[in-house]
Amino acid sequence: MSVNVGIDAIRFYTSNYFIDLRTLAAVRGVDPDKYMLGIGQDKMAIPPPDEDIVTMGASAAKSIIDRDGKDRIELLLFATESGIDQSKAGGVFAHGMLGLPARCRTVELKEACYGGTAALQLACAAVARNPSIRALVIATDVARYELASPGEPTQGCGAVAMLVTANPRVLAIEPEHGLFTSDVMDFWRPNYRDQALVDGKYSTRVYLQALQECWKQYREQSGRGYGDIHRFCYHLPFTRMAEKAHERLAKDSGIDLTDEQLDQQVGPSLAYNRITGNSYAASLYVGLACLLDTESEDLAGKRIGLFSYGSGCVGEYFSGLVQPGYRERLFTHEHRAMLENRTELSYRQYEDIYNLPFPTDGGTHTFSRYRTGPYRLAGVKEHKRLYETVS
Ligand code: COA
């Protein structure tokens, strides 16, 4: 008999700093409607110098650990495409900061924005094999493109932590899925660069192609169709992409989609991303957290369809069933408070932070204190990152 496995808790974290895209549009000489309407973004989250993928990931996970404890967490999967070390997994730093049990398998996963889904599915498989353990998935990224490039307004940052268990209390992940891997160069970042390279228009086309293939397989494998899914979440490089994806999926399913249906079926997952920007591996799950937090209708018993896409590329379509009582497990108030209390940056401040070099000389460097979550990157010494808990 198969075991019911999935997401028992989900917590989102982002930087306390953002730049308004109207500010960026004015400096770049672009009509702000291109950003607000054309790509569907209002603000982008900017990590200060003492925030990185590890502090964001650990900050997302801390609320879950504080509430649900750390016992039986035997697997920590840390998904990112903005890794800070070629050798050591970012998850091992997070493991130490969170004080997790030493009896734990910890590893970092990468496949562009798909990494978080790989981590979630592998965690589900591990828990299905041994339902007595729990797994912690952390998806965390900083999206960074060249200044004044087409990708610039789609930058952002954030992390999502998910506790994966048997008999989950938020979302049971169903076993059927559609998969697609294809060796393409739509977005990549060689090890010697700290900004992504992207063929943006091409990447949107491959995204849609991957969606079509995955959706076809999902339908064949599950015997379900468009009408069996209540709400839809998509990987969110920018929110307009999700709308385009949903239009394509509906068309392929023979549905004549109205604007109202589009808004109802996809809209509730977009609000957080609109004001934080892309967080690569975390982005689909920022959308899921947003849907669960902001949808006024009780989703208990309803099916959510999820499409994950990572450039390069790998796609996956899968689904989950929202569990009764899920609202009691959410961190809606924490998410709202975090997003409402952010500090706005001027263009000059954004550019200064963007251009600040990370020290690579092996010396001792102490980083200025900005507003962060419970953890911060205090400095670097002898090429070792020094993290501290914020009291
Ligand atoms: N008012 C309203 N809409 C406007 C506008 C205005 N004044 N000016 C432009 N737009 C619309 C365009 O018509 C276009 O809409 P469409 O895609 O429906 O045709 C949209 O805004 C974007 O404009 P475009 O000129 O195509 O933007 P761009 O070439 O500068 O960049 C991306 C768009 C997506 C290619 C770019 O943001 C990018 O490279 N992003 C990073 C890669 C990425 O996120 N890939 C996604 C897959 S993972």
Image (cartoon, rainbow, N blue to C red):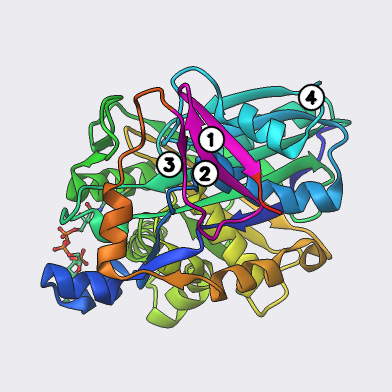
Q: Amino acid at mark 4?
A: Arg
Q: Taking the image as drawn, is residue 53 in sight?
A: yes
Circles 2 and 1: CB distance less than 8 Å?
yes
Circles 2 and 3: CB distance less than 8 Å?
no
Q: Is residue 384 magenta?
A: yes
Which quarter of the rendering shows the C terminus? bottom right
Find disc 4 in the rendering and name its residue.
Answer: 129
Quadrant of the displayed image that contains ligand 1 = bottom left
Circles 3 and 1: CB distance less than 8 Å?
no
Find disc 2 in the rendering and name its residue.
Answer: 140
In this view, 75 is above or below 175: above
User: What is the CA distance from the residue labelled 3 to the residue labelled 4?
Assistant: 26 Å
Residue 76 picture quarter: top right
**Residue 366 placement, left or right of 76:** left
Find disc 1 in the rendering and name its residue.
Answer: 79
Q: Disc 1 or disc 4, which is closer to the eye?
A: 1
Specify few, some or many for label 2: CA neighbours under 10 Å numbering under 14, 14-19, or 20 or more. many
Find disc 3 in the rendering and name its residue.
Answer: 113
In this view, 184 is above or below 377: above
Indicate if the residue with disc 1 has its beta carbon within 8 Å of ligand 1: no
Q: Is residue 293 magenta?
A: no
Circles 3 and 4: CB distance less than 8 Å?
no
Q: Disc 2 or disc 3, which is closer to the eye?
A: 2
